Amino acid sequence: MKIVIAGAGEVGSHLARMLNEEYHDLTIIDENEENLAHISESMDVLIVQGSPTSISVLTEAGVENADLFVAVSPAKDQNVNIISALLAKKMGAKKVTARINDDEYLDYHNKFLFKELGIDMLFYPEKNAADEIIDLLQKSEMSDFVGFANGRLQLVVIKLEEGAPLIGKCSADFDYPADDLPFRTVAISRGDETIIPQHETIFKVNDLVYVVSRKEAVDEVMSYSGKEEIEIRRITILGGGKIGEMLATKLESSVDFIKIIEIDKERCEVLSERLNKTLVINGDGRNSDFLYEEDVKSCDAFIAVTSSSETNILSCVAAKRMGVAKTIAEVENIEYIRLAEEIGVDSVINKKLLAASRIFRVTLSNHIRTIKCLSGSDAEAIEYVVHAGSLITTAPIKDLNFPKDAIIGGVIRGQETFIAVGTTHIKPHDRVVVFALPSALSKLEKFFA
């Protein structure tokens, strides 16, 4: 697939790394020579320096033959993204998608307008992040969560802290009929390693455990983590940027108390005018004494969404030590994600991964319904739709030589959901949930094509 990415910033460079592993024909456009140099040092891709709104630059990048054009210049360059996407479409790109920073464009009628103009998909990373945080607040005992088929099959992520009942056990310790498993561990993130577990793999302290579960078995899964669901009624948000404002706007009507702490005084004045029921405080959240004075400990959840990953991590750790039950940090530096989880942050979100998941879906064939890049691991959760005649339907899973760096977690068949085992025989029209390391993605294609 020939893909042109306009914008070599954080989102564009991360997406390029993901797609480069899939052996796509990639071209990267950016005006910043330093950004391009950084990409060319780590990836074998074609680079073009110049403005993505320049027709000559787009021509040099070969957009007329592109299967996909992705405009991901930073949020402040929304108009650049929209104009370059429209130009690319008119010049011959088959699909185009653009990053935006205006929630108004995502209204149903406005999205339809952009579709008519030729832009196939708009994405707003900050809105995606806010939506993800709200989902995490609703599943407060989990580190992460992905629902399939309206939640009938779920991938839940739990962190094993000291005293968790699962520590020291292995999959072989659970005595369930092989043809009626309620859940299955599909991966363990341990340090810098993602493990596809075997029956004898032992669970350890600080493991992030990825479990595919039928809806009715989720409570049992959570009982092994030793964590109980928390009712989130009082919330403190550190950071009054776009994500913080969107969170407060959406949560004001559903919680008892919500507070935003923002260091910029002018921004505080703007927030005070726009928000109805949110208390806005001007202060420095990097100061743990200030957090203590603001009675952060009385809140059920502390959410750090400033522009600094370090501030978000450290303030969440401070809030946790003060007794806050649920902490969520936006961590844009991918190298810090595991560190944040290891030192006690309950959940981590990353705009780059969320945006990449949405765009990555466009690059894949029509038998993939859902894909999510998971922040605590270098793996993806993928929901495939099985077509008649595909290799996956020809024999039970154990006889298919299925990639060892991927695992089928569960199957949705009509109104029935079940956990996959070696004797499971996948049928046409099934929806299959697969947990896969990056090295497996190209191998999986032959099974579901």
Image (cartoon, helix red, strand yellow):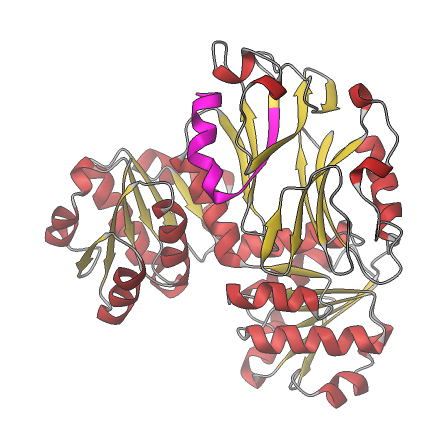
| Whole-percent x, y for residue 331 in the image | 57, 66
**Depth order, front residue of 124/374:** 374
Classify 308 as above or below 198.
below
Classify 312 as above or below 283.
above
169 vs 15, left or right, is right
User: Which residue is painted at 55% across and 59% down in the image?
Assistant: 350
352 vs 207, left or right, is left
- Is residue 436 inside the magenta stretch? yes
Q: Classify the position of the N terminus by image quarter.
A: top left
Q: Magenta residues?
A: 432-449
User: Which residue is painted at 62% across and 21% down in the image?
Assistant: 398
Q: How many marks do you count on the picture? A: 0
- Is residue 206 inside the magenta stretch? no
| Whole-percent x, y for residue 187 in the image | 66, 44
| Whole-percent x, y for residue 164 in the image | 87, 55
User: Which residue is painted at 44% across and 58% down in the image?
Assistant: 101
**Depth order, front residue of 375/257:** 375
160 vs 334, left or right, is right
| Whole-percent x, y for residue 145 in the image | 69, 45
Q: Classify the position of the C terminus by image quarter.
A: top left
User: Which residue is painted at 75% across and 37% down in the image?
Assistant: 199
